[in-house]
Image (spheres, coloured by chain):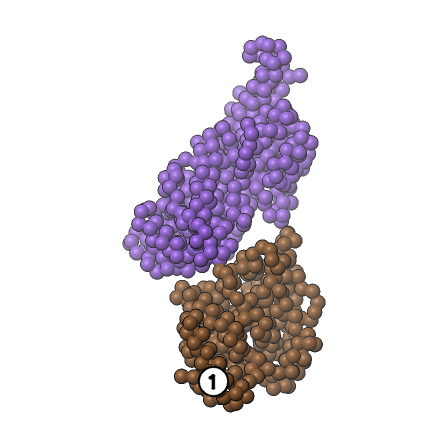
Amino acid sequence: MTKRTQHIAIYGKGGIGKSTTTSNIAAALADAGYRVVQIGCDPKADSTVTLRGVNYLPTVLDRTREGGRVHLEDISVVGFRGVLCIEAGGPVPGVGCAGRGINAAISLLQDLHLFEEFKPDIVLYDVLGDVVCGGFAVPIREGLTDRVYVVSSSDFMAIYAANNLFKAIQKYAPSGGAKLGGIIANGLIAPYARPLIDDFAVQTETRVVQYIPRSSTVAQAELHGTTVIEAAPDSAHAAIYRELGEKIVADDSSVVPQPLGVNDLRDWARQWGDLILREGADAPVPIRAVA
Amino acid sequence: MTIVHEDRNGCALHGGVRLLGAIGGLVPIVHANAGCSLGATLADGTPSGSGGPRYTGPLETSSTTLVERHVVFGGGSRLREQIKNTVKVLAGDAYVVLTGCVPEVIGDDVPAMVKEARQQHFPVLSVATPGFNGNAYRGYETLLNTLVDQLPPLLDEAAAAADAAPDATAEAINLLGIAPGQDAFWEGDLLELEGWIGRLGVPVRRLVGVGQTSADWRVLPRARLNVVLSPWGREAARRLHSRHGTPFVDFGWLPVGSRDLALLIGQIGQSLGVAAEGIAAVTQALDVRERHFLQKFAASYLHHGLQQRVAIVGGTAYAIGLARYLAGTLGQTLAAVIVTDVPDESRRPDITAALGGGAEAVLFSDSSDEIAAALTAAAPQVIFGSVIEAGAARALDAPLVITAAPTGHSPVLVRSYAGIAGALALAEDFSAAVIRHQAAADEHAAGTAWPLSRRAA
């Protein structure tokens, strides 16, 4: 059991499985006896659904919008194995400023002394994938989180988004911002997927902390509105999430990533495209296939 | 007078700029749009008629004057540049970055810029004071909380580097909660209280205004007692208590007249462990002083029928202080008390309780329309408030005594309405306003000159 609260931010392209991964990490750690808080930092406010059921949880910003004093119990609910679930929320799509919203929600949680009151071992921030403005970078700035993990599949757009996140991390790291704990490779299907992500990690001087193959167990649990840990506690995927959770808690090493330039990233991707075309998408590919 | 722009309470940035301007040795660096820093600078003078000299001069404010380029691409490096230049051209003991709305919306990493400056051994700290966080009282409170937390260690660090000796007057009483500039009579009021409280034998630190510098803030945590004079100083006192164990007296308002000042001095004396005789010696002196001068007032009070229905409009500290004195000592009827500084809901029952049920109506509002409607409904004979109440006063044909910001055409230098001198000044200004009003009415009615023989109706 950790002495100090660890604050972990999880980023990645929209739809890549951040919330699924984060919720399963939360569930796995809670199942192992840790006190866990999961904070959804996405205006969609659906990060913690599989932990707490489909019941409506007012977001921090919903309550703020209503005015008056906000209490911790109004904006949090205890989910699977005691995970404290919170959704920052945001404005109606197309209006207002979601970045400021994240900023304001996190400030409010600090004002409410959330961490002093709940005394968690680990706090997971599930953050909107595209860091389009300063507000979404708040979780990686100095003092808020200890490490960042980036979820990515082997699809180019996911890699592209991960590379952009590396740029944000690289920008804030010199002034004390959080560094990268590693890449969580998610939704892997094709044989080339793993070596491709491994190679991206090599190119950017980072590392992959866990490989999560695409699985019907995950899809089914999602459809049932639960985590894999809850729905299929003895499945192979539950074991993968448990291992990932333990790695995150136990290994506090981190690096400053070296993102590729736009053209370098394109060239690198093209080489992989050529390779897959040449060998066939189903052919086994050795790690470090592209020099 | 037509009020084009009604600025009763300013914004958080204004409150921050005004507080820093009242402390010698502290230099504000405004990280905001050009309009914000100019606005804050001009607004510094507006609420109290004349802002007066600030530490950095009457108009000089270091500002990043952000433009669209910074909004789109971020203003962090512009702030870095501004800090670097400010420490070169403006001498100071510490520099405080105050952020406006734009950097807070776009998410500039201001703490990172401050950290960089600190690594280069410049004493810099930052406070988020975007206007959307609230009014100037809220800005005062936010900055005050940060200063009590961060300024003493920052100054200690700088002093250690310069090998400076510690201040000898650490064992003092700090006065917290009166917001410079926004509370229009802050300086005169704090000087008046300093004089009387000091008679208990412990030095008093006003922390703001003439002679108060960063040196006073450096030793602030080592005080014997913190005295809170409005809701806006309570959190700072609470922090000093939890961090340094300093006890505090949460008085909650500005004492006007001997009755409330004796109450405050009694609480301070008890907290300091002053013997009952020592406290009594001071409180009796208050009473003697006030009584001596009020007796001069007795004849004209009766002659002019100075028992009136009055309404009071102002921030918590002044609304309560004035109401208790006007009703409790001068025998006025409180038709309405309107509290304009927007204190937290949780504080409002205490505020209403402090009024002692003496007011016919109590309203919390900073909306001039609502306030004007409440004044019309209460139909007072005299209004105590800001220049924004001039229209309502005219409509009611009631004289207006300026006791709140903005003071309009009534410059404030060292005028006070607190303590004994301030209470007597209030009696003078109140009676003068009523008598002038009566005279004007008589003149209008009869075409006569000064009506020396007017009696109460």
Count of numbered tags: 1
Q: In this view, does B362 lie above or below B244?
A: above
Image point (58%, 16%), residue name: B439
- For disc 1, the marked residue is A275
Quarter of the figure with the C terminus of chain B: top right
Q: Is residue A115 above or below residue A283?
A: above
| A125 and B305: which is toward the camera | A125
Q: In this view, does B52 lie above or below A241?
A: above
Q: Quadrant of residue A288?
A: bottom left
Q: Chain B is drawn in which colour?
A: purple
| A226 and A78: which is toward the camera | A226
Quarter of the figure with the N terminus of chain B: top right
Image point (49%, 36%), residue name: B47
Image point (62%, 71%), residue name: A83
| A60 and B167: which is toward the camera | A60
- Rate crowding at label 1 as few (under 14), some (14 to 19) or many (20 or more) other CA atoms within 10 Å: some
Q: Could you tell me the amino acid type at mark 1?
A: Leu
Residue A26 visible in image: no
Callout 1: SS: helix
Whole-percent x, y for residue A46 in the image: 63, 68
Whole-percent x, y for residue A69 in the image: 63, 53
Q: In this view, does B340 lie above or below A138?
A: above
Q: Which chain carries label 1?
A: A
Q: Quadrant of residue A223?
A: bottom right
Whole-percent x, y for residue A124 in the image: 55, 70
The chain painted brown is: A
Image point (64%, 77%), residue name: A227
Residue B80 visible in image: yes
Whole-percent x, y for residue B341 in the image: 57, 42
